Amino acid sequence: MTPRARQTLMLVAGAGLLAFFVWGAVGLPDFGHYRGPYGLVINHVAGSERQVTNAVASLVFDYRGYDTLGEELILFVSVVGVATLLRETRGEELPAGRDDATEVPDTSDALRVFGVVVVGVTLLIGLYIVAHGNLTPGGGFQGGVILGSAVLLVYLTGELVMVRWVEPGTLLEILHSAGAAGLVLLGLGGLIAGGAFFHNFLYTGTEGGINSGGIIELGNATVGLEVMGATILMASELLEQLLVVRRGSPA
Amino acid sequence: MNVLLGIVLTLLAIAAPAVVMVDDPLRQSMVLGFYGLLLASAFFILQAPDVALSMIVVSSVLIPALVLLALGRIRHLESRDDE
């Protein structure tokens, strides 16, 4: 196919897509005029049935917890896949004595000071967002990424300490898997307690309380753990390779 | 709200092609982060703070970090091959 024909095809297809898009967008209900009954029902019952003030969290971890389980397992499997692939390509590059990583250049003082100031704050924000997922916007996924990036900051400012401390393949993988398994167990808990899969079998507390929501709050915690593990695992696999490569090349 | 949304949508219309047109992947990851922040503000204005938070952490933290790490790795591999 000549470039000219390809361009013509693209323009025709693009115009068609634009036309369909505009047609679809015009037919959407106006902002604030939601017509589906499901969301209205959830908004109505989330507070009285589950004592949570964030209706989104009640949907994600309770009423449609099964969907979240699927999404979480997608993340879990893809991160395991990435880690496996990266390790495969690393192969024999790994030197026997991998403890001596003295060839890696030191990070600058400015970066280290910045890290010290920011890591604590970032950790706190991450924990807050995970812990208050049932009350305010946020939850396990958002908080988990923030927690993971806090650890990543430590990597970037003083990476050597980190690489020795958290060896990818042991603690990280346990964290990552424990988070994923936790949500499955929460779902099974509902089954064992006599209800359905992801039946909310725990005491749901009082409305607006930090411990309200029963499995919603625990679900946030497990997903937070899983996402944090996934973030660090993926980054550390890339970083580990970086370190190995750096170590292999003369400084 | 409509004025704010109009401003953000206009900025988005400028930022989206900008992401595509930047050639250098390093700079592209930064522009992408900015674009994500704009998109997050649009979600926030449309009263979807949960989605906005996810957008912020994914587009301004996760993607740039992973892209930077991958770029660093590629650079080191290339410098080794040159020797």
Image (cartoon, coloured by chain):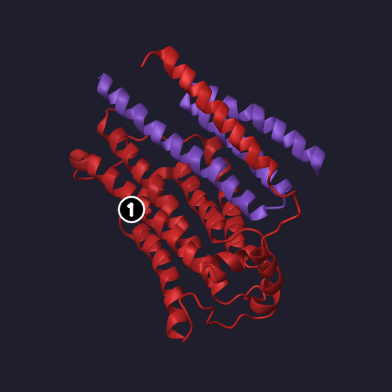
Chain colours: A red, B purple
In this view of the protein, which residue sits in the foreground, A52 or A11? A11
Subunit ID for the residue under disc 1:
A
Name the residue at 71% across, 57% down: A34
In this view of the protein, which residue sits in the foreground, A166 or A91? A91
Name the residue at 48% across, 18% down: A8
- In the rendered image of this protein, does residue A86 appear above or below residue A55? above
- Circle 1: residue type: Val
Label 1 Cα neighbours within 10 Å, binned few <14 / some 14-19 / many ≥20: some
Residue that lies at the very extreme toward the bottom in this rendered image: A194
- In the rendered image of this protein, does residue B25 appear above or below residue A24? above
Res. A75 visible in picture? yes
Q: Quadrant of residue B83?
A: top left
Which residue has dot 1 on it? A80
Image x and y of residue B81, in percent: 26, 23
Query: Quick check: A22 left or right of A79?
Result: right
Secondary element under disc 1, as helix, strand or loop, is helix
Res. B22 visible in picture? no
Q: What count of labels does the image hold?
A: 1
In this view of the protein, which residue sits in the foreground, A82 or A131? A82
Image x and y of residue A170, in percent: 31, 59
Image x and y of residue A56, in percent: 63, 63
